[in-house]
Image (cartoon, grey):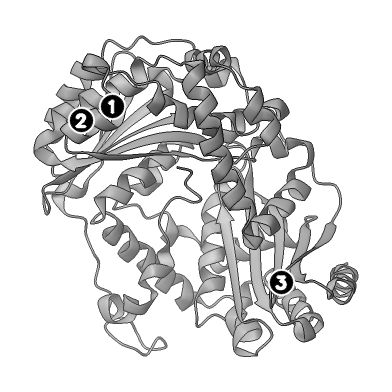
Amino acid sequence: MRRMSGGWTRALTACVVTSALLGTTDLGAQAQVQVLAPRRDQTIRRDTLPNGMTVVVVENHSVQLATAHVVFRGGAMTQSPELQGVPHLFEHMLFKSYSGSDNASFSQDASMAKASYNGATGDEEVSYSLWFPSDELGANLGLMATLVRDPAFKDKELQMERFVVRNEMQRAQSQPSFLLANASSQALWGNWYSRKNTIGTDLALFAVNAELLKAIYSTWYVPNNAALVVTGDVDSEKVFSEARKHFGRWRRANDPIKANPIPVPPPLDSTFAFVYTHEVQTVTVQLSWRGPTLAHDSTDVRDASTLADLLNADESPFQRQLVDAGLFRSARMSADINRHGSELRFTGITAVDQITNALGGLGTALDQLVSSEYFDAMALVVDAKRDRVARALAYEETPSLASSLGSAWAIGRLGGMAPDSTTASAATRESVAAFASRWISKRPYVIGALTPVGTEEKVGTALAQYIAFMK
């Protein structure tokens, strides 16, 4: 039940932008821009209960379905080395700790309320979701409140659930892409890696007992560290009323973030390279940099997302240099933004006999990012319109919207998720180039490669040459 990623992707709408927004296929011509305004029922409405719990509602009456999503600030960022993966296990155990009337299980009561459900653990959040017919709103908010408010942890159920979580761990560890990303994360974060290791370790998993779960619950599962997000065919005032009814008697406690501040990760002082061999046919190259965080570098967060969008656009010079030229089969940049530990990542796939040329082309392209002339002014206009289209589409997908809004609340970025947000349009060629200079060109990084068995020497030499070239 672990979500691997959250949020929405602007690139989903790349194929419709020119027809839906620009009115012409000639990007060099004067564009006739059609502004997409959010519908009146697409606004984010907020309330705060007396106990400090945030309630967020977005109405969409197109389908008679609703989503209730409760999210807590927490997740991997709360983990000391000996607790790696315990929030993930806790997520599973909260469902097991539920006891309804006549000792009904959570799945039984969810079935009675006509709901499906899931849980998820991320870097900075743990969340629980219900999807149900909208006329079952009251029953499902009551169900969710009982789940998160009145757990009873039992050692017998914990013994069984350990192996369920361990099976999830083993499935992840059987995937070559996970192994590459995990090795890169360990190198990038060093001693702070425990606060990024969502999946966990066997040692921590089998050391947990019911008393530790109770301690975690009393510390982190408090209403003033939680948000209820409801989306779909609902009335906002009714949601606020039902939230007060079902969650109102949940008592406020100490702010867990203030009581347990997240330590700042140690600096990455030098560049690191590694090669991972597996039964694969191609070479996957991954470069990772520390990125701007909302806690310390919030002004750079906008440009991180914009840079990734510009580089990933099919028509970008970055794609022409690397993919269209045949150096890489695919080349993608991502920006994983958090409050405490953000990451910029390039991932490219190439052939073994092309690795040296591919890395040379990549180095040249990355060097050019520091020049504002590398970015076309019209590309930023198109990116802002893509963002607006993606935002409109996301507000039509209310089940996933609840999760996205919950994640945004958890990291303190809910305002940027509003349907009429203009954050993306504020980026300029100069600000994006300056961002690349600060966070990519002048920072140490981790470079790793997942390569076929028997090719590690050739690929390792190519990585060493790349590092020397970039110096």
Rendered location of residue 223, percent (x, y): 38, 18
Which mark's residue is nearer the viewer, 1 or 3? Answer: 1
Rendered location of residue 381, percent (x, y): 42, 71
Where does label 2 land, which residue? 140
Residue at position x 39%, y 11% from top? 252
Rendered location of residue 411, percent (x, y): 49, 37
The residue nearer to you, when weighing 284 against 166, is 166
In the picture, the quarter occupied by the C terminus is bottom right
Residue 366's label in the rendered image is: 3
Rendered location of residue 276, percent (x, y): 78, 62
Label 2 crowd (10 A; few <14 / some 14-19 / many >=20): many
Which mark's residue is nearer the viewer, 3 or 2? Answer: 2
Q: Is mark 1 on a helix, strand or loop?
A: helix
The residue nearer to you, when weighing 103 against 88, is 103
Q: Is mark 2 on a helix, strand or loop?
A: helix
Residue at position x 84%, y 56% from top? 272
Instruction: Measure the alpha-carbon separation of dots 1 and 3.
Output: 47 Å
Label 3 crowd (10 A; few <14 / some 14-19 / many >=20): some
**Marks 1 and 2 in Cβ contact (< 8 Å):** yes
Which image quadrant for residue 331?
Answer: bottom right
Amino acid under disc 1: Met
Where does label 1 land, which residue? 144
